[in-house]
Image (spheres, rainbow, N blue to C red):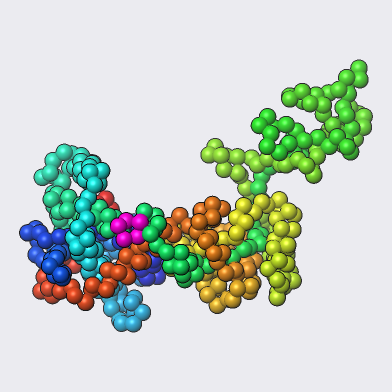
Amino acid sequence: MKHRTIRLCTLLLALALLALPLASCSSRGKTLLTLDKDGVKVTFSVNLYEFMLSRMKGALVSGGYTVGGYTPEQDAFWEYQDTFNGADIQTLGEYYGDLILENCRTYLAAMWYFESMGLTLSESQQQSIEDRLDDVLQEHGDGSKTKLNSVLSGYGINYSMLREVYTLEEMVNTVQTAKYGANASLVGHNLKEDFLAENYVHFKQIFFPYYRYIYVTDANGDTVYYVEESQLKTIAYDTVNGYEGTDENGAPITDANGDTIYYATPNYNEEESPRIAYDTVNGVPSYVLDDDGVAKTEELTEEEREALNKEADALYLELQNCTAAEFEAAMAKHNEEYDNEEIYTDGYYLQKNVDYAAVGSDFAYFADIITAMDAMEDGDIVKITSDAAGYHIIMKYAPTPGAYDEEINEPWFQNFNSSLVEKLFLDECYTLSPEIELDAKVLASATDIKRIGSNYYF
């Protein structure tokens, strides 16, 4: 079981918020929160607050979070105390209860915007709601609402409330699209640039991996070089320095593609193991692929790692106080020596406040990069060691204007627009928080997160 410090990061919060419900005025369950403003009144029931608790608990359980050796399915987990909000000593149960309550206020405000703006759901949205409900009814209730309600009761709701949840989730999407446009198309350039600068780090790196790629070799164990872009795996022979092979009749010896074979030495047939003369300058090696089409690698030995570290340290010291142009020249030279192709010509971008360890252990070192870069100025260099990958010599750069719109940067900005919209949306909803009324007695009656079920499905 993974052990992680329990701090709710932006990634987990985003995943939770995107799935959390709203509630309009409803007779189902006691009212926990009320917003009555400008003739529009919306409420949030305690049942849906419990439902949100169950979703958060399910996210923590499935994410493998532990504290003090305890899991979220044990009371001791929720009773653990620390300054989780950065200020006050509180239990984890209190921390997440406060967090979810704040989410409730946010989504109640969003519901108010939906009503105030006179928005409606499209036919496709309404059909999507029905389709989701039908899927849930069949998968978790075997077509029986009674059976499904027995499952949903563990999360504080019933089938009718689940319909309300799905309906209100579509309302949130509608509000966001109306305010910010599809894919943030209505958000101004300056706001996007500010968000980029505040939430992303930009760097280029010289990478020394703990592994080497395995290339296709011939019978002698020599790496085979092919004509680049060849669909027939045409061999790239060294026709300048090689020797044309002929049989005893003087006829050229050809390969499977009908091309004349060139050898490294003349009179090849007198050699026990004649070697092919490959064009290593113009040809390219080919990776050995696994069944999924992924290039195979082999790990370096401990001795090779030590030598690699010394090489990385030497280059790191050499590059101190270098210019960006000098760094990039060293990067290009290194990539050529290591037969690496740098596909990210604008470098790398990482979003801050993301729990990269939750994404996968191989990405945990991203957090080390971000932490290091917080104390760096543009043009500074740092060496980072990642347990799973290797040694990274990194130079910090200012973000390239409009980087989020560049095709080459697409892998780094898949969540850019949604994260930006989420921030703008939350900020705007937060302005209504002071006008939301909380019924403290109803809150005190809610099922504690220790007792609520772990919700993974709804």
Q: Position of residue 67 (x, y in %)?
A: 35, 69
Residue 419, horizontal then vertical, whole percent? 39, 61
Q: Residue at x 80, y 38 (%)?
A: 278
Compared to residue 151, the image places residue 277 above or below, namely: above
In percent of width and height, residue 373 lies at 55, 72
Question: Does residue 412 appear to the left or right of 445 in the view shown?
Answer: right
Is residue 117 shown above or below 246? below
Judge whether residue 180 is colored magenta.
yes
Residue at the image position 53 percent from the left and 60 percent from the top: 403
Residue positioned 43% across, 67% down in the render: 191
Between 366 and 102, the one lying in front of the other is 102
Q: Position of residue 6 (x, y in %)?
A: 36, 70
Closer to us: 266 or 413 = 413
Residues shaded magenta:
177-181
Q: Name the residue nearer the viewer: 138 or 305.
A: 138
* Residue displayed at 57% across by 43% down: 294
332 horizontally vs 245: left or right: left
- Residue 420: image quadrant is bottom left
Which residue in the rendered view is the most extreme toward the top?
Answer: 249
Residue 47 visible to the viewer: no
